[in-house]
Amino acid sequence: MKKKIGFIVAICLVITMFCLSIGLGVYYQWLDNERINRENILKMFADYYDYKVAAFKEENETLTNVDVAFLGDSLTDGYDVKSYYPQYVTANRGIGGDTTYGLERRLDCSAYDINPKVIVMLIGINNIDTMLENYERIVTSLETNLPSSKIILLSLTSMTLEWGRNNEKAKSRNVVIQDIAQRHNCTFIDLYSVLLDPNTNELRMEYTVDGGHFTAKGYEVITNTITPYLQALLGK
């Protein structure tokens, strides 16, 4: 009887180890696939970043007398500023997926080389946990290299759906952005509240396509919010 029980236990152990080996194999394959996917995404962004920077440099060769340069990530990249601000000479310097660090690396071709009268900056959501490490350094660099340019700092925006999990972080970052604006004599514009649905305390659904990026209606509201500040700074 003891031999029979021992045999059964041994078989169970073999089966368990076999299942574990399969499970671990699947898990490690998943990890490998995740690594490959992350690497592919990072490469796609790096390629797009390089493409956009090259495009900015090419545009800079003929772009003159810029009224407003819009600096940022995908929220700016997808903003058709030429259509929304036909009264101004504009430069869209947004790159989808960019961070405060990516923006800092390209300030020359995004701003310095075109010497805009006004700079409008919306950046940080893609590295919300680390954005404050160099956000103020960007502002200081803009002041130093473009002393005659006026700077508008846009708050991070309210979000919804999966993006909404970052709303509390966005609000806390906005307090710091406003403080930076005050200390550096920049203009601060609160887009968070403007786009907020008071009933859900998140971004209004009609303003977004996915919870974070904007619809045409969202961009209309943003444009209507920013325009009076541009008129005051540019005198037109």
Image (tube, grey):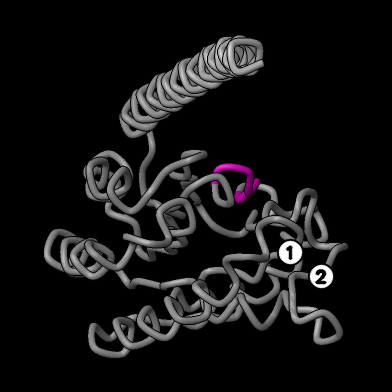
Asked if residue 26 can be seen in this view, the reply is no
**Circle 2 crowding by C-alpha within 10 Å: few under 14, some 14–19, many from 20:** some
Q: Which residue is mark 1?
A: 160
Compared with residue 50, is residue 92 higher up or lower down, i.e. above or below?
below
Residue 62 spot, x, y in % from top left: 36, 31
Is label 2 in a helix, a strand or a loop? loop
> Which amino acid type corresponds to the residue marked 2 in the rendered image?
Arg
Q: Is any part of residue 69 visible from this angle?
A: yes
Q: Tags 1 and 2 in contact by the CB under 8 Å rule?
A: yes
Q: Residue at x 69, y 80 (%)?
A: 194
Task: Give the mark nearest the N terminus, 1 or 2.
Answer: 1
Q: Secondary structure at mark 1?
A: loop
Residue placed at 50% from the left, 51% from the top? 89
Residue 31 location (% of width, % of height): 48, 22
Residue furthest front in the image:
1
On the rendered image, what quadrant is the C terminus found in? Answer: bottom right
Q: Quadrant of residue 147?
A: bottom left
Q: Circle 2 is placed at which residue position?
A: 204
Q: Which residues are magenta?
A: 77-81
Left or right: 105, with 6 as reference point: left
- The residue at the point 52 percent across, 39 percent down is 96
Q: What x and y, as percent, mark residue 154? A: 48, 71
Q: Position of residue 205 (x, y in %)?
A: 85, 64
